[in-house]
Amino acid sequence: MKWKDKYRFVKQNMKRNKSRLFMTILATAMGCCFLVVLASIGFGFQKSITEEITSFGKITEVSIYGKTNTSAEPDNGFSLYSMEEVKQFEGIPHVASVVRQNMVSLSARYTYDDYARETDYSPVFTVMEAEKHGKLELSEGRFPLAPNEMLVGYDFAESLLQAGKPDKPYSASVLNKEISMMLTQPVDAEGNKPASMELKATVVGILKEPAKNWLQDASVIMDQRNIITLQPLLALEEQSLVDHYQNVLVYADDMQHVSGIAKTIKEAGYNAYSVASELTKVDSVFLFVKLGLLFVGAIAVLIAAIGIYNTMTMAVTERTQDIGIMKAIGASPSSIRSIFLIESSFIGIVGTLIGTIVAFGVSLAANRLIPIILSKQNESNEPMNFVFSDIPFSLIGVSAAISIGIAILSGMRPARRATEVDVLKALRRDL
Amino acid sequence: MIAIQNVSHQFQIGKKDSEKLVPVLNRVNLVVQAGEIVSVLGRSGSGKSTLLNLAAGYMRPTSGSIRINGTEVSSYSEVQWSKFRLAHMGFIFQSFQLITSMTAFQNIELPLTLKGIEEKERAARVRETMELVGMGEYQHYYPSELSGGQQQRIGIARAMVLRPALILADEPTGSLDSETEQSVLDFIRQLNRDWGTTFLMITHDAEVASIAHRSVTIHNGQIVG
């Protein structure tokens, strides 16, 4: 018997009791929808937490913070890294870039036109080529090529205030503008007049907007070579910063290699931290949460499966005579079985399809409405960047497999009963 | 065509602890040659229906051998029987046994569908067979819309649509009036004459049995003449 003909039989059979079929599909759809929505809460929370973690650091980044204690003297965490060490990190397989940065104990005054900003922090001095390969992202412009070029944070322009009018920030773009920097030594204990030095650099690139709207980035990033110019102002312990680095960040070429790189760095005697390893911990916690939610959701599908079992059992009972006639003239048990299995699979597939579509609607509505309700309750106008429900393809796949699988399983027993129909009893009388 | 040798059959009745074996057939021997119409006459409870059920594979004999077309079928499994029926046999039932949710066309088409024949060929063969039984105009009628005689013609068309060498008929005119009975019997004779189809026919009516080349009578589970 051909599949096409089996399907025709199923269609013909299903037309006999449309309302019962509709109710069974409805129950399956509700079960599947409940399963998807429930599990989507776990996926939503995981997505939100993952985004929260990754917004504070790059996913391929491994930051190194000092050497592991091998001696009795505790490590203060402010180690300097030599070029040899940088090269050692660069030699680890799958390392895309080793970013190295320095900051010095000089206060800075940035000036453009009659706008200025004073800060206790010096610019960040870095190797631009490494930053570029470390995927430092710009919102506009390019990476500096010369020491007299620099990058500034997204909010740098706004941090410049007009002389005498502290409420008037600079409102235009600072791209391609030359900024003057007065870098000054801290006042020493004896009260000597601190020395200063002026540097001028053109803004050639502006960094990407911070991930969170409450974060402000007014940083200044300059080429490492400027350290040499500033050497006369540097404290004694900072003299080595010409060829040593305070902050080293190792970037993997792909997220999957981060843990391997972090492991190698740790084995080499360094403390290493990566967002990816945090995410692995989060993922393993959420795996159990999602499995738990899927299990609870699967109970709803199991209840729907009782409906399918009942419907299929009734279908077999109602069609006993037809089955008997078919067997009497030569239908094989496998043909009879597959007709009923196709019917239960059809119920499972249609129910899953409807349930998944409805689940998408519920998920969308929840993500739109819950933040509005919560912000009204909290009397806050701040937008909530929280995903309450997320339905990834993997969830659709898993829930479809559960729903359709359970539907087929619940049709197996009635299908087997159909093959066991006694011809003579089904024909209601002996030949 | 059919060789039934020393076939006995017993029914089990009663509950497990007090079950009883009731013999229905006792060492029955019957040979039906190819192209023959053989009728089996007998009263109710004589065992004639059991004999046909065994020949159709709806029951297994307690002992003995049944050979059809030279093949020993008495120990066939259900799957083997389903294939064998489709390949060699057609069935005519007293109460027609048409599927009520299917049209006359679909009922006749059923054996062809079960055999996996292409839709186009099926349609041609069903139309041809319907014309042959004089029911060409009733393709889209449901069994409930047809008279008893018309339903039996559809039943006969379904039995012959695969051109089987053997048709087992159970009281084929048992539910028909005398006028319709005669036309059905004429048709069976015509099929036998034109196509050489072998018939093993169960009846309690001597007039129906008269169309057969040979009649055997069964009494108390034994062939008596």
Image (tube, rainbow, N blue to C red):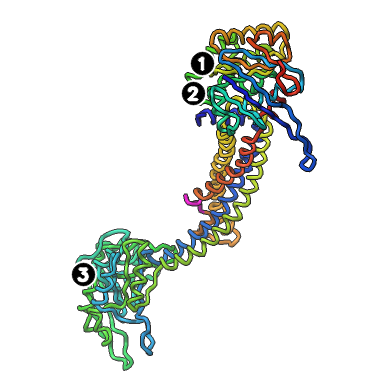
Of the numbered discs 2 and 1, the one sitting upstream in the chain is 2
Q: Characterize the local packing of mark 3: few (<14), some (14-19) or many (20 or more) Cα atoms within 10 angstroms.
A: some
Q: Characterize the local packing of mark 2: few (<14), some (14-19) or many (20 or more) Cα atoms within 10 angstroms.
A: some
Q: Which residues are magenta?
A: A390-395
> Residue under mark 1: which chain is it in?
B
Q: Characterize the local packing of mark 1: few (<14), some (14-19) or many (20 or more) Cα atoms within 10 angstroms.
A: some
- The residue tagged 2 is B117
Which amino acid type is marked by label 2? Ile
Magenta segment includes A321? no
Res B42 visible: yes
- The residue tagged 3 is A148
Residue at 75%, 22% in the rendered image: B46
Above or below A317: residue A208: below
Name the residue nearer the viewer: A34 or A260.
Answer: A260
The alpha-carbon separation of the residues under discs 1 and 3 comes to 92 Å
The alpha-carbon separation of the residues under discs 2 and 1 comes to 10 Å
Which amino acid type is marked by label 3? Asn
Name the residue nearer the viewer: A217 or A311.
Answer: A311
For the view shown, which residue lies furthest in the bottom direction?
A190
Between label 1 and label 3, give the one nearer the viewer.
Answer: 1
Let me know if marks 1 and 3 both belong to one chain: no
> Residue under mark 2: which chain is it in?
B
Asked which quadrant contains residue B153, the reply is: top right
| Image coordinates for residue A190, horizontal then vertical, percent | 31, 94
The alpha-carbon separation of the residues under discs 2 and 3 comes to 85 Å
Labelled pair 2, 1 in contact (Cβ < 8 Å)? yes
- The residue tagged 1 is B125
| Image coordinates for residue B172, horizontal then vertical, percent | 67, 15
Let me know if marks 2 and 3 both belong to one chain: no
| Image coordinates for residue A27, horizontal then vertical, percent | 63, 43
Callout 3 secondary element: loop
